């Protein structure tokens, strides 16, 4: 029979359990929300509700009782200055447990323990009134814009680039300029002669050998006729 067994041992000894619950309640009052398993969340809720009830009393004896569980001075000050005044008009039910689902690994049911500062229902979005657009505020549409095409750039010939003569100069002036530079024509002719490789010489030799064979054939045919 479970006479006078109101608390869950949580599988640990008394000193371990009290220290663990004190640390969890301290984190809950500091951050407003913690994540733990469902059995531990139920025990944390019992202790946290007692601490908030002490904060609503707001006297020296209540502060000493809170210090016996919460060992952080800043959290105790926050408990009596903030949470005690926020829950002054609320009679119990200061915390909430929301189940998250099984934990990966041991499949333990996880939950969120948080202080009830607002409702879980999401606020409905307020519909904004539609604004009437006046015709005067409309911007007139712009007409077609004419684009000036750029004129093509005139390209000068190679000879004009070399000699510096533009296209406007006459043919006679170009001929006179060529006559003034005879050395360039001679150099071009020599360069063309030098460009011929050994392949060109062999082709000439082959042609000469073909001509000699034709001559020999003609001479042999004349001897046969005689």
Image (cartoon, rainbow, N blue to C red):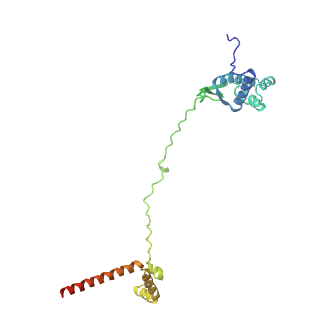
The residue positioned farthest toward the top in the image shown: 1
Residue in the picture at 40% in, 77% down? 199
Residue 56 in view of the camera = no
Left or right, 67 with respect to 28, comes to: right
State whether residue 194 appears in this view.
Answer: yes
**Corner quadrant of residue 81:** top right
Q: From the image, which quarter does the C terminus lie in? A: bottom left
Q: Residue furthest left?
A: 225
Q: Nearer the viewer, residue 214 or 170?
A: 214
Residue 77: image location, x then y, percent: 77, 30
* Number of marks: 0
Nearest the viewer among 171 and 21 is 21
Q: Is residue 176 depicted above or below 96 in this figure? A: below
Image quarter of residue 93: top right
The percent coordinates of residue 13 (x first, y second) are 73, 21
Q: Nearer the viewer, residue 37 or 172?
A: 37
Task: State the quadrant of the N terminus.
Answer: top right
- Is 82 left or right of 181, judged from the image as shown? right
Residue in the foreground of this view, choosing between 39 and 46? 39
Residue beneath the point at 32% across and 82% down: 209
Name the side, left or right, on which 222 lies relative to 163: left
Find residue 87 and report its horizontal and vertical position in percent. 69, 26
Q: Is residue 114 left or right of residue 192?
A: right
Q: Where does the image place residue 157, in percent across and percent down from the top left?
A: 43, 78
């Amino acid at each position: 029979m479970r006479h006078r067994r109101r608390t869950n041992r949580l599988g640990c000894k008394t000193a371990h359990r009290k220290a663990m619950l004190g640390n969890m309640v301290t984190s809950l009052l500091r951050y407003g929300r913690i994540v733990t398993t469902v059995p531990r969340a139920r025990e944390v809720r019992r202790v946290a509700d007692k601490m908030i009830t002490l904060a609503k009393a707001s006297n020296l004896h209540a502060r000493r009782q809170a210090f016996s569980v919460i060992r952080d001075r800043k959290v105790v000050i926050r408990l009596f200055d903030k949470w005690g005044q926020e829950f002054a008009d609320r009679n119990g039910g200061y915390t909430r447990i929301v189940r998250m689902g099984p934990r990966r690994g041991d499949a333990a049911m996880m939950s969120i323990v948080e202080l009830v500062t607002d409702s879980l229902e999401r606020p409905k979005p307020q519909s904004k009134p539609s604004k009437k657009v006046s015709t005067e505020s409309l911007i007139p549409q712009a007409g077609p814009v004419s684009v000036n095409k750029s004129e093509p750039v005139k390209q000068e010939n190679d000879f004009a680039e070399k000699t510096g003569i533009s296209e406007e100069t006459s043919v006679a002036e170009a001929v006179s300029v060529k006559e003034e530079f005879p050395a360039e024509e001679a150099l071009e002719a020599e360069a063309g002669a030098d460009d011929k490789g050994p392949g060109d010489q062999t082709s000439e030799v082959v042609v000469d050998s073909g001509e000699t064979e034709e001559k020999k054939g003609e001479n042999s045919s004349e001897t046969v006729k005689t």
